[in-house]
Image: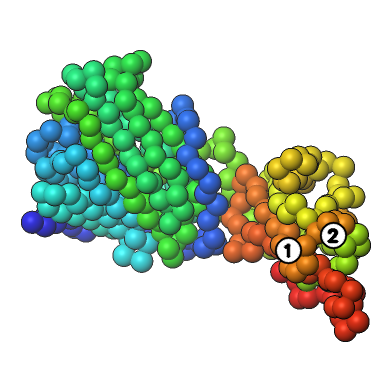
C-alpha cells in the first residue's frame, strides 16, 4: 500500500527566495557527537512513537509542533524501516519516504523556499545551510529498547550507523550527532538510512523519536556562500627508477574557490618498496604504517600551495609498477573530484634501462 501527503502551495506564504548559488561539490566526512543547537533550522524530518499509527512522520520547517509548518502521515512502523529524506531543489520541496513490510508512505512539503522566506523574515537562505544534525530520543518503557539509524548515506557518502540504546539514561534522554555539509541549489541533498527498532514498546507519542535537521552551525566554519574548491596535482605522475635511485616529486594544491580552505592537510600512503624523504618539516610519518600526514594550514581563495619531496626505490624493491597515493583533506570547504593524486613508480631492471628513459614525466594528476 502507498500513501501520499502534500502541503498545497495555496496554504504557504508567497515570498520567494531567489538567486541562490552554490558550488555543486560537497564536503562531508562523518557525523560526530554534538551538543550544538543549530541556528536557522529550516528543514526537518521527524519520526516518532514507533508502535502504532499515531502521526508517525512529520516533514517541514521547524518548529514542527506548529501544524502550519508541516505535513504528516500515520506510519505503521516495522522492526526495519527504509528512509529517504531529500531536498529536491528543482521542485522546490522537501520529500520524505518511509517503506517497510507494511507499505510505503511519501510526504511532500511544497514551496519550501517560499515558506522559509516568510517564516524567517528572509534571515536564512538555502545557501546558508552548512550542517545536518541527527537526534535520537529513547524514553522507552522497556529497558532493553534500542533505536538505531543505520547505513546513513548523505549524497551517497557513508556516514555510519548511530544508536540510542540506553532508555532514560540522562535528560533529555537523547543523543546527537552532526556533520558539516553544503546544500547546492541544483542538487539539493539526499539522505538515506534504515531505522531499526529493537524491543521498542512505549505507547507514548513523545517517548521515542528521531529528528533529522538541516540548519546553520556557526562554530563549524564551513563557508557555503563562498566555498573553496580545492584539488591536488603531482608532477611527474609516472616515473622510471632503478633500485636505489631517487627523484623529486612536486605537489601543488590549487584553490579555485572564493573562500579559504581551512586546516588543509595531505596524507601520503607509501608502499613498502618505496621510501619518501625530504618532505616538509611539518610532515609526521609512521615508518611502520607507511603513512605520512602533512598539515599545511589554510589556503586562501584563488590561492595555491607548493611543496616537494624525494621518492626512492628501495634496494630490495621488486621490478614493475608501484603506486604512491596522496590524499587531500580540509575542515571547511568543498572538495573537487581531484581530492587524491598518485605517483606510479616503475622499478626497472638493467635490460629495461637500455631502451627506456630513466625519468619519464607523465601528465599531471
Of 285 and 262, which appears nearest the observer?
Answer: 285
The secondary element bearing badge 1 is classed as strand
Q: Residue at x 17, y 49 (%)?
A: 100
Q: Say if mark 1 contacts mark 2, CB within 8 Å.
A: yes
Q: Residue at x 19, y 20 (%)?
A: 142
Q: Residue furthest bottom?
A: 355
| Picture coordinates of residue 349, whole percent (x, y) | 85, 71
Q: Is residue 68 rendered to the left or right of residue 218?
A: left
| Picture coordinates of residue 304, whole percent (x, y) | 78, 58
Q: Mark 2 — residue? A: 313
Q: Is residue 251 rendered to the left or right of residue 89?
A: right
Q: Residues within 10 Å of mark 2 (few under 14, many from 20)?
A: many
Q: Is residue 43 visible?
A: no
Q: Quadrant of residue 289?
A: top right
Of 342 and 193, which appears nearest the observer?
Answer: 342
Which image quadrant: the N terminus? bottom left
Q: Is residue 76 above or below residue 203?
A: below
Labelled disc at residue 95: none
Q: Mark 1 — residue? A: 322
Q: Residue at x 54, y 60 (%)?
A: 25
In space, the residues marked 1 and 2 are separated at their CA atoms by 9 Å
Lower position in the chain sequence, tag 1 or tag 2? 2
| Picture coordinates of residue 252, whole percent (x, y) | 78, 61
Q: Is residue 21 above or below residue 120?
A: below
The secondary element bearing badge 2 is classed as strand
| Picture coordinates of residue 71, whole percent (x, y) | 19, 47
Amino acid at each position: 500500500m502507498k500513501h501520499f501527503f502534500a502541503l498545497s502551495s495555496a496554504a504557504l506564504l508567497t515570498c520567494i527566495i531567489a538567486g541562490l548559488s552554490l558550488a555543486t561539490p560537497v564536503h562531508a566526512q562523518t557525523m560526530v557527537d554534538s551538543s550544538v543547537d543549530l541556528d536557522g533550522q529550516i528543514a526537518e524530518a521527524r519520526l516518532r512513537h514507533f508502535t502504532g499509527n499515531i502521526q508517525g512522520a512529520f516533514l517541514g520547517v521547524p518548529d514542527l509542533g506548529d501544524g502550519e509548518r508541516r505535513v504528516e502521515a500515520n506510519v505503521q512502523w516495522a522492526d526495519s524501516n527504509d528512509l529517504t529524506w531529500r531536498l529536491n531543489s528543482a521542485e522546490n520541496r522537501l520529500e520524505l519516504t518511509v517503506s517497510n513490510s507494511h507499505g510505503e508512505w511519501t510526504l511532500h512539503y511544497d514551496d519550501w523556499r517560499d515558506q522559509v522566506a516568510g517564516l524567517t523574515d528572509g534571515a536564512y537562505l538555502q545557501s546558508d545551510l552548512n550542517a545536518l544534525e541527527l537526534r535520537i530520543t529513547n524514553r522507552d518503557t522497556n529497558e532493553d529498547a534500542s533505536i538505531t539509524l543505520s547505513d546513513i548515506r548523505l549524497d551517497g557518502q557513508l556516514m555510519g550507523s548511530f544508536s540510542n540504546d540506553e532508555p532514560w539514561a540522562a535528560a533529555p534522554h537523547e543523543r546527537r550527532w552532526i556533520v558539516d555539509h553544503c546544500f547546492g541549489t541544483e542538487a539539493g541533498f539526499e539522505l538515506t538510512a534504515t531505522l531499526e527498532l529493537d524491543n521498542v514498546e512505549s505507547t507514548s507519542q513523545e517517548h521515542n523519536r528521531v529528528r533529522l535537521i538541516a540548519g546553520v552551525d556557526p562554530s563549524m566554519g564551513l563557508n557555503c556562500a563562498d566555498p573553496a574548491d580545492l584539488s591536488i596535482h603531482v608532477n611527474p605522475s609516472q616515473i622510471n627508477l632503478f633500485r636505489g635511485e631517487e627523484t623529486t616529486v612536486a605537489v601543488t594544491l590549487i584553490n579555485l574557490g572564493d573562500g579559504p580552505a581551512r586546516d588543509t592537510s595531505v596524507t601520503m600512503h607509501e608502499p613498502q618498496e618505496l621510501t619518501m624523504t625530504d618532505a616538509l618539516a611539518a610532515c609526521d610519518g609512521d615508518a611502520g604504517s607507511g603513512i605520512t600526514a602533512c598539515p599545511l594550514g589554510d589556503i586562501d581563495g584563488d590561492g595555491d600551495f607548493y611543496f616537494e619531496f624525494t621518492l626512492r626505490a628501495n634496494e630490495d624493491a621488486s621490478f614493475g609498477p608501484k603506486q604512491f597515493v596522496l590524499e587531500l583533506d580540509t575542515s571547511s570547504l568543498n572538495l573537487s573530484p581531484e581530492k587524491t593524486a598518485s605517483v606510479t613508480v616503475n622499478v626497472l631492471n638493467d635490460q629495461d634501462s637500455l631502451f627506456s628513459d630513466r625519468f619519464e614525466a607523465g601528465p599531471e594528476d
